[in-house]
Image (cartoon, helix red, strand yellow):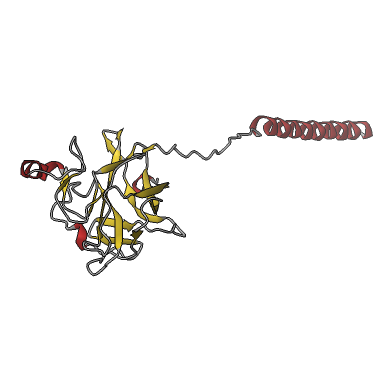
Amino acid sequence: MKAKKFLSMVLALAMIFTLSVSVFAEGEQAAATNDKEFKADATVVIPAIDVTVPTTGEIFINPMGFTLNVSGTNKGKTATAAEASASDAAVTTSDSQVASPIYYIKNSSPMNLEVSVSPLATVDAGAKALSIASTSDLSASTKNEVFIYALFVDEENEDTTVNGFDPNMLDVTPAYTKDGENGAVAVPAKALKEPVVVGTVLKISDDNTPVPGAMSMRFFGSCSAQPKTDWNNGDKVSVTMTFTFKPVPDASDNG
């Protein structure tokens, strides 16, 4: 009887030991097969800014307000009646006291770009009587003063011809002024402390194919018509426009 009880106890302990070993083994096997690791690097990706800016150009100071050719083979010369009439669509002539052709800033980047500019006007060393004015109203000035500003127009929203817009009526005494969709920045004789944001040059897409967006730039201004010292033909002012471009997130692209 004692032998049977002992044998039963041994068998029971053997079963418990076997069961516990089996459960332990299964636990080890489950941890080994399910403990897997995934690792990835999150990398900042910013598309390259691809923008085209004209590097040189011409601006004409026209104290008498004659109608000048601002582009073409006769640029810088008084326009004939035929040339002035033909200019209606192409804007190749201007009677502004400061005038220029239309220049384009083109954006071929895959995102919109905020455009800032640091303008600066420097009088040529030989033009001793000429000076840069700080106000656009020079009707009473007796000095050889010129006030220059750049007009920026978003090609998506505005007509580059600026039809119906009188550039001499825009007050740009502050660093930057907007007249509707037109934005103008004065070109001072001293560098600005901070660049002036003049707008956003848009990306343009057609069937997901990038097409360059554009912003136009033209120069206008005013000068004293009857200074004490006569204007000297050939006197020059160098205008430098330093541009900065900053990507603008498109809200419609955010998921």
What residue is rendered at 25% in x and 63% in y?
A: 227
On the image, the x and y values in percent for residue 6 come to 91, 34
Residue 96 visible at all? yes
| 174 vs 73, nearest the viewer | 73
| 138 vs 168, nearest the viewer | 138
What residue is rendered at 18% in x and 43% in y?
A: 77
Whether 135 is drawn above or below 153: the answer is: below
Quarter of the image with the C terminus in it: top left
In the rendered view, does 163 fall on the left or right side of 156? Answer: left
| 80 vs 34, nearest the viewer | 80
| 208 vs 104, nearest the viewer | 104
Q: Quadrant of residue 202?
A: top left
Q: Residue furthest front?
A: 229
What residue is rendered at 20% in x and 60% in y?
A: 168
In the rendered view, does 11 fall on the left or right side of 171? Answer: right
Q: Residue furthest right?
A: 2
On the image, the x and y values in percent for residue 61 come to 25, 52
In the rendered view, does 190 fall on the left or right side of 89? Answer: right
What residue is rendered at 85% in x and 33% in y?
A: 8
Whether 128 is drawn above or below 245: the answer is: below
Q: Quadrant of residue 13?
A: top right
Quarter of the image with the N terminus in it: top right
On the image, the x and y values in percent for residue 237 come to 34, 51
On the image, the x and y values in percent for residue 173 come to 31, 65
Q: How many numbered dots are placed on residues in this image? A: 0
Residue 248 visible at all? no
Whether 177 is drawn above or below 244: the answer is: below
